[in-house]
Amino acid sequence: MRRSRISCRAPDGARVMAPVIRVHTLIVGSGAAGLNAAVQLHRQGVRDLLILTEGLDMGTSINTGSDKQTYYKLGLCGAEGDSPRAMAESYFAGGSMHGDLALVEAALSPRAFMNLVNLGVPFPQDRYGQFVGYKTDHDPRQRATSIGPYTSREMCRALIAEVRRCKICVRESRVAVSLLTVEDGGRSRAAGVLAMDRRGNLEVYLADNTVFAVGGPGGLYRTSVYPKVHTGAIGLALLAGAAAQSLPESQYGLASIGFRWNVSGTYMQVVPRFISTAADGRSDEREFLRPAFESAGAMNSMVFLKGYQWPFDARKAAGGSSLIDILVYIETEIKKRRVFLDFRRNPEGFSFDDLSAEARDYLTRSRALQGAPLERLRAMNPGAIELYREHGIDLSTEPLEIAVCAQHNNGGLAANHWWESVNIQRLFPIGEVNGSHGVYRPGGSALNSGQVGGFRAAQYIAARGRVATLNRKKAMQAATDAITDVLSWLAVSRHAATAWAEDRAALQQRMSLAGAHVRGLPTLERAVREARDQWERLRVSGTRYENGADAAEALRTRYLCFAHLLYLDAIRHAVADGVGSRGSALALDPAGQPLHPLLDNTWRFTPENPAFREQVLETRTDAAGNIRHTWVPRRPIPDSDLWFETAWADYREGRIYD
């Protein structure tokens, strides 16, 4: 690691000095993926490392979870056979996922999983050392495992301990505000980032390799289960021209919004009461689900099933458990009411005898036939009650406010099977910012994907990126240009008509209305126009901030605004092309199929066109800011050369990196 300084002129003529830190490999972000990348790089002899982060205790990985947060891996228990190819086919079956990425995520899952075990993450095993598993959504085998609600948090804690043991340098309280790139042999290559500290001071980090582990787009939505401390920074890469893929493919689901947490699993299986109120949260209380179901038993059985089928799924909207999400959405977004789960009383007309055989048998076998939902929850999962109590919510005395929230982006930046960006060399997007997944994915596969990405980026950097090749003169010029741009924009922003908090709220509202799980072409076209207008205004006139500490939030709003424009335009493109309702999104069409007899023509929808499962939507921008979307055929699962002698030779000679 080497240090110097750079001098630039501010718009007022003052000379600004910024420190320059030169490092071999820079890891931006400190979630589970970024931490693992740092650990693996260190183990492979790359010691000139630096982790740049807002804070080791911030981000999604260490601040989120679910009823039973799942880690998806190759089967390691019992007599049922499994293989990387079989697991890759489970990934591939979800649609719009490249086959080589599916195979890599499957093949490296045991290695990534056992690394966590060796670091002390207490995944359950039986007395014979088998790592027991269960079936998760979109999983034909028992590949899933969990250590409870905080699986990813414990992964982070174990990895942080290893980072500290390895004495890897960590810079906290920094926000990346520009991704630096230079031209290298006619192609763009990453050169590091420009960052800002809490006082508003700029710092330059130049690197031969940039591991981009900035998480999902949590800051794009108003109704979101992403922790409030996490906004995501994919917009930095998009502004730098990085190619993206599958941006329209996200997951949405019911979540509490006071304390942001998924209300999946046992929260639904104990069959709580769904109530809505007026905007004050107290008056005009009513149970609103019942009219949509033929009987109380049918309604309660569907609520139970929601525990298994938690994310909103377009295939289950008509006559399935995802109708519940639509009914909650109508109450909150259209009727402007508030929706709560009440665990203190049973829903009106509740009877165990009226439940489906599946629900009744599950509750019986779980010894959860108590008289009220809270008592059933205490019997099945007492930690689920304690979780909310730790965050100031007592389920025994108050209802739990919920909404349909953004939960995970299956798309993101486009990268190859070594997790290197397809059009910016030496940029390695890993974790949720990497758009490796397609329409559907097995539950818990995101945790595996992030760990695999850390391994792949580290292995490739150690093999092909160890020699420093970054042109220092070009990199310093890129840094100078970025500082000049940021200072000029911040100077204009001082006098902007709207404050950054207003602008961010506007884009988040737009995304939740038009770009979440309910999508209609007219609404999307209007949203894209509004998003483009907002982006052009922010690009030219800025967004107001109060002081140096506030400047980073203004800059963050700038790249969030650009990102939301690309996301909305990609969603609009997919809907206009006739992809239909798939994954976690319902495509509305007044001429389509009816969703439910009680709902008007506004809620007719277009079924999925399965032909698009064989394609992946790529999104790119040019230097002028023009957006281009292209459907490309998805790559098949590779037929690898499995003859040992030739495979060994390819490995010895380094041909696996070609």
Image (cartoon, rainbow, N blue to C red):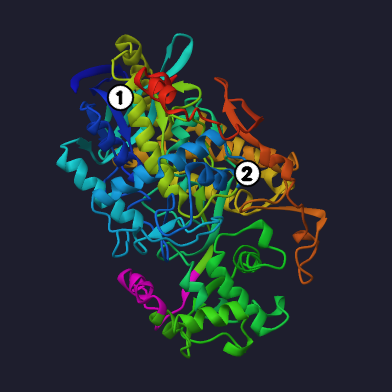
Residue located beneath label 1 in the image: 462
Which tag, 1 or 2, sits closer to the chain's start?
Answer: 2
- What is the x, y in percent for residue 620? 58, 27
- What is the x, y in percent for residue 391? 33, 68
Q: Amino acid at mark 2?
A: Gly
Compared across the picture, whether 55 is left or right of 64 comes to left
Tell me if residue 52 can be seen: yes
Q: How many marks?
A: 2
- What SS does tag 1 mark? helix
- What is the x, y in percent for residue 623? 54, 20
Q: Quadrant of the C terminus?
A: top left
Q: Would you call the spot at circle 1 few (<14 residues within 10 Å), some (14-19), or many (20 or more)?
A: some
Residue 95 is tagged as: 2
| Nearest the eye: 414 or 275 | 414
Q: Amino acid at mark 1?
A: Ala
Find the residue positioned furthest to the right: 591
Tell me if residue 544 can be seen: no
For residue 405: magenta? no
Residue 134 is tagged as: none
Residue 180 occupies quadrant: top left
Magenta part of the protein: which range? Answer: 380-401
Cβ–Cβ under 8 Å for marks 1 and 2: no
Residue 634 occupies quadrant: top right
- What SS does tag 2 mark? loop
Q: Residue at x 48, y 81 (%)?
A: 365
Q: What's the distance in space between the residues labelled 1 and 2, CA to CA?
A: 32 Å
Compared across the picture, whether 344 is left or right of 477 comes to right
Is residue 594 depicted above or below 502 in this figure? below
Compared across the picture, whether 436 is left or right of 176 comes to right
| Nearest the eye: 367 or 517 | 367
Compared across the picture, whether 169 is left or right of 504 comes to left
For residue 385: magenta? yes
